[in-house]
Amino acid sequence: MLCLCSFDCFDLDFFSGRFGDIGWGGDMTTGGDKPFISVHPDDLKFIFELEKQSFCDLKVVNNTEHHVAFKVKTTSPKKYFVRPNTGVIQPWDSFVIKVTLQAQREYPLDMQCKDKFLLQSTIVPPPANVDELPPDTFNKDSDGKVIQEMKLRVVYMPTSTTQGNLEDEVLLKGSEKSPDANSAVQHLEDERDAAVRQTQLLQQELDLLRRRRYRKTDPGFSLMFAFVVGLVGILVGFLLNLSLSSPSTE
């Protein structure tokens, strides 16, 4: 069965800090022992991309045999569009609240979101119509009224493209804020290039030594050298013999 919904704007009294120790993600800790409603999922998760809307469905289930009215509040009403933000769920019924994250122009720091949602619920008499709810329906000051409250976190989930853009943005911001870091990076790059050049020179010297060693151990070179040395020896011996055997000119 359908939930009757209101399209009123968000309340901002979430900032007042008067909610005390309210449980996170489905843990009701105020206003009664048994929770009137349960919520799935426990956190509001949005796939975050720059200049694009993101959506999250929040299923609210009535765990009672009574009509239960609910109201959604947020710390950042300008960032989120919630429909419905107020409504009545019939006994044992459920309804889906659609939450839209408006397109954002910049990434949050470390992709961490501090926004929070508060979901209030209370039992109302049948037949219940959201347009006929008294203004003080969710007022805690009403005598004997039980108001249960639940906090929900907001989680941003980056896509692969978002993650790459975020890393580029972080590097860019880091370079703008730290010129000394740029100098250190440049120095490391220069040392790397010098090491590469030194490695190349050592490789060239090693190749030259290998070629020289190959020439010394070349058998053809050794035979030729021996032949030349032998020939020179023969010629020297012949000349010595010739000079010794020639007659004296006295």
Image (tube, helix red, strand yellow):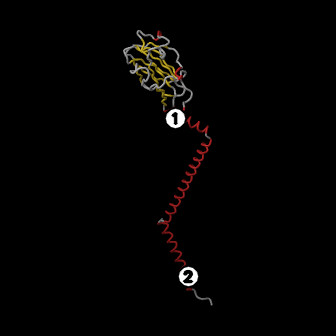
Q: Residue at x 52, y 18 (%)?
A: 11
CB within 8 Å, label 2 to label 1: no
**Figure quadrant of residue 42:** top left
- Residue 191 vs 243, above or below: the answer is above
Give the residue pinned by disc 1: 164
Residue 59: give its label: none
Depth check, mark 2 against mark 1: the one in front is: 1
Q: Quadrant of the C terminus?
A: bottom right
Between 217 and 181, the one nearer to me in the picture: 181
**In the rendered structure, which amino acid carries the disc numbered 1?**
Gly
Residue 240: give its label: 2
Between 123 and 171, the one nearer to me in the picture: 123
Report the side of 127 relative to 240 (left or right).
left
Q: Residue at x 56, y 37 (%)?
A: 171
Count of numbered labels shown in the rendering: 2
Q: Residue at x 50, y 28 (%)?
A: 48
**Mark 2 or mark 1: whose residue is earlier in sequence:** 1
Q: Quadrant of the N terminus?
A: top left
Between 11 and 164, the one nearer to me in the picture: 11
**Figure quadrant of residue 146:** top left
* Whole-percent x, y for residue 153 in the image: 47, 27
**Figure quadrant of residue 243:** bottom right
Label 1: element kind: helix
* Whole-percent x, y for residue 63 in the image: 38, 18
- Residue 76 vs 185, above or below: the answer is above
**In the rendered structure, which amino acid carries the disc numbered 2?**
Leu
- Residue 168 vs 215, above or below: the answer is above
